[in-house]
Image (spheres, grey):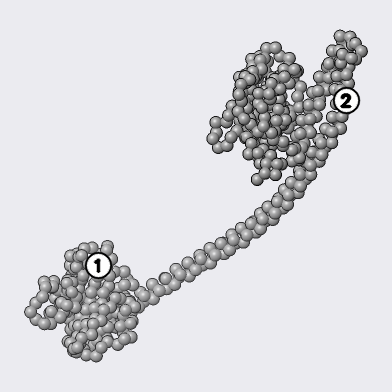
Amino acid sequence: MSVVSDPGPRGDAAHQERSSAVGSAWTVAPVLLSSSQDVFGLRRTAQQAAAALSLERPDQVRLATALSELGRDRLGCRGLEVSFGLVPPGRPTALLVTFVWSAGPPPARETLDLAAKLVGIEYEARPAGGRIVVSQPLSPEAGGGDEQHARLAEVLKAVARSTEADDLRAQTRDLIATLEETRAQREELRRLNEELEETNRGVLALYTELTQELEATNSGVLALHTELEDKRHQLQEASEAKTRFWTNISHELRTPVNSVVALSTLLLAPSSPALTVEQREQVELIGSAGHTLLSLVSDLLDVAKAEAGHLEIHTEPVDLRLLVAHLRGLILSGHGHERVTLVTPRAEEQPPLVTDETLLVRILRNLLSNALKFTERGEVRLEIDVDPEPSAPAVLFTVTDTGIGIPPEELGRVFEVFYQVRGPHQSGRPGTGLGLPYARTLAELLGGTLTLTSTVGVGTKVEVRLPDLGHEYTQRAQNRKGGP
């Protein structure tokens, strides 16, 4: 075979036909197929050309097999020629093999289907003869178009005419190589199947283990939920029992304490027999202790009612000026520290507020008494302002002192019922630990909040924000009058 580059259209019809078969590809001068020996040579040539263009071994065998089958099918057609070509740069790189014949029957459908399973095929039927173009894509690693064309030309120059025995031996070698490759692939497939089965067994075992663990966890969660529900019922029962206890004991304590307070008042009355100085001091001490105990019992009863949800709120307009004066009288009557000054707002116009006055007095009394108790010198100040937050009308009560302060680690516990911050400051300052929890409970009951900040050695600041319940008060008043 002689190798030529297709320079473009030429005058003879045969060449134009061949050129149209491969388009603008680089082509090799065609050879005639007229015998079975030529078909054997075509198979061998195709395999060597594919090897020169760096095709994989399976692709070489597929290309050679497809060309061999097409050659046998077309053998006997008039003017049967086969040419090799390469698609030039600018298009997908591929090896093209073109069959052209001038007269003869069309190719068998079975042959075309078989070849199409192995390589790319284009068949064109003509009034006289036909054309089949076989395309085999090349790997980008095979080099550029010029390099591929040079290798293909070199291989086809060296192709020698082979005998039938040579072709049979080549086919046998190909068959053996294919069988070896098939066996290797079968072994690899078997190994992969074993690995997959092992993986599946591991996944199944893991799934089983996770399922068992999940079931055990679910059982544990269910048991824990049941236990928590039992604990909740127990705590609820304990809370109800505690509330009943405080309610009952408060009522039982209030009667004798009232008797003690009343008797001490009678003994100190001017109409009673005269007492010595020592007796008067003892009776006054009894009366003071009775008032303190009565106040404590009232607080305990209110805490129990609040926790049980039985503490009723009676909202009325509050005159904050009178309330401050009343508080000042209550606090100063029991205040014995001359080095501590109680500062309250001046008797000027105060912001309007509708709330439960009794509960508000108890809140502020507890906060002021607590502040005075732990302030040795300086001042305790009460301030009343309109809450600057525009969300809803509210009044802000602020109690500040210059007392000992509360350590940071104790701030989280000062609102626990009966908890007291331990330290030297407790000496001479008896208490129950109800003041702050009681004040916060009442503030929340009124729809407000109570917050506390403190610095050791500097003092404590407590802010109580209470909403104006005027809308509820107006609505209730209208309901009493039968209004809309």
- The residue that appears at 23% across and 74% down in the rendered structure is 96
Residue 469 coordinates in the image, percent (x, y): 64, 36
Using a 10 Å C-alpha cutoff, classify the residue at mark 1 as few (fewer than 14 neighbours), some (14 to 19) or many (20 or more). Answer: few
Residue 285 coordinates in the image, percent (x, y): 83, 17
Compared with residue 142, is residue 4 higher up or lower down, i.e. above or below?
below
- The residue that appears at 67% across and 14% down in the rendered structure is 340
What residue would you read off at disc 2? Answer: 259
SS under mark 1: loop
Give the distance between the C-alpha atoms of the residues marked 2 and 1, in whole angstroms. 113 Å
Left or right? Give the position of 386 relative to 106. Answer: right
The residue lying furthest to the right in this view is 273
The residue lying furthest to the left in this view is 11
Circle 2: residue type: Ser
Compared with residue 193, is residue 433 higher up or lower down, i.e. above or below?
above
* Residue 388, quarter of picture: top right
Compared with residue 311, is residue 204 higher up or lower down, i.e. above or below?
below
* Residue 446, quarter of picture: top right
Residue 5 in sight from this viewpoint: yes
Which disc, if any, is residue 23?
none
* Residue 459, quarter of picture: top right
Which sits in the foreground, 212 or 475? 475
- The residue that appears at 63% across and 39% down in the rendered structure is 471
Circle 1: residue type: Pro
For the C terminus, the image quarter is top right
Left or right? Give the position of 192 relative to 167. Answer: right
Compared with residue 91, is residue 121 higher up or lower down, i.e. above or below?
below
What residue would you read off at disc 1? Answer: 92
Left or right? Give the position of 35 relative to 196. Answer: left
Q: Nearer the viewer, mark 2 or mark 1?
A: 2
SS under mark 2: helix
